[in-house]
Amino acid sequence: MNAMPGRPVLVDPSAGRVPAGGAARTKSQETKVVALRTARSPLSARALATLREAAATVVPPLVMLAALLLIWQLATDKPDASLPSPLKIWTEANDLIVSPFFVYGPQDIGLGWRVLTSLERVAYGFGLAAIVGIVLGAVVGQSVWAMRGLDPIFQVLRTVPPLAWLPISLAAFRDSGPSAVFVIFITAVWPVIINTAVGIRNIPQDYRNVAEVLRLNPLEYFWRIMIPSAAPYIFTGLRIGIGLSWLAIVAAEMLTGGVGIGFFIWDAWNSSRLSDIVVALVYIGVVGFVLDRLVALVGRIATRGTASA
């Protein structure tokens, strides 16, 4: 109905009013929810991505290990089997697996102590190989005459098997400890020398020009130019060297005796303790894997530092 002229129009106070908790408040709440979801979604996505990556890294090796153990168990679960089954190994060598650091006597000790003894020898031999290898590699890589004179000798000596050096070292040192350290050194030094020399030869010419402009002395040039530039090559050689060192000490200890992991394997073989040998092999593999990853980690940190510098 049309309003009459001159008469006030009555309007319903509730008309056009938004009720409490109505659309305006709902729209505000939706805005807050969207904001919260937007703030939380990157974190959730990142966490899910991390979990997926961890699962993709861990699950496949575990599945393959379980399949390998199952096949091994089925293949050796026979009365006339020449090799022990996983369950038999767990039964016969349970103390070596569960308690790696027990001490019952001078030679009756856990594999943890034997591994530490072997690692001590590796530390001496590999540390000496790293120092000598980097210095000699820098000389060979920097000097053409040194490369022509020493490279053929290095190529010949590096092909000699590690155990072939053991009689020479025993005759020279007359002690099993220094002899084992020498075998580790002579085995690990060649990849360090070769990779360091390759890295030095691949230093960009611009770096050499900067060193000449700055008038760096040989020692400054070695620490500020050569080592940072050749760091990726050096750590590649160190990774190869640490693996060879661990192989060499196990082989050398089989012949030199002592309380190392290599002598334990040889003694277990003489006593027909095949289960103990299998457990020792697992220890050797795990320790070798850890050593390789440690050197790789140090290499990534060092090369990242040189790159940022």
Image (cartoon, helix red, strand yellow):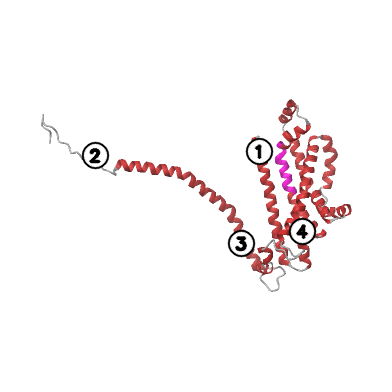
**Residue at the disc numbered 2:** 17
SS of the residue under disc 2: loop
Which of pointers 3 and 1 indicates the residue nearer the eye?
1
Residue 40: x percent and y percent?
Answer: 45, 45
Which amino acid type corresponds to the residue marked 1 in the rendered image? Gly
Most foreground residue, 154 or 128? 128
Spatial separation of the CA atoms under disc 2 and disc 1? 66 Å
Most foreground residue, 208 or 181? 181
Most foreground residue, 24 or 84? 24
SS of the residue under disc 1: helix
Going from N to C along the chain, the mark reached first, 4 or 1, is 4
Residue 50: x percent and y percent?
Answer: 54, 49
**Mark seen at residue 66:** 3
Going from N to C along the chain, the mark reached first, 3 or 1, is 3
Residue 52: x percent and y percent?
Answer: 54, 51
Residue 247: x percent and y percent?
Answer: 76, 54
**Residue at the disc numbered 4:** 260
SS of the residue under disc 3: helix
Which amino acid type corresponds to the residue marked 4 in the rendered image? Gly
The quarter of the picture where residue 260 lies is: bottom right
Spatial separation of the CA atoms under disc 2 and disc 3? 69 Å
**Residue at the disc numbered 1:** 305
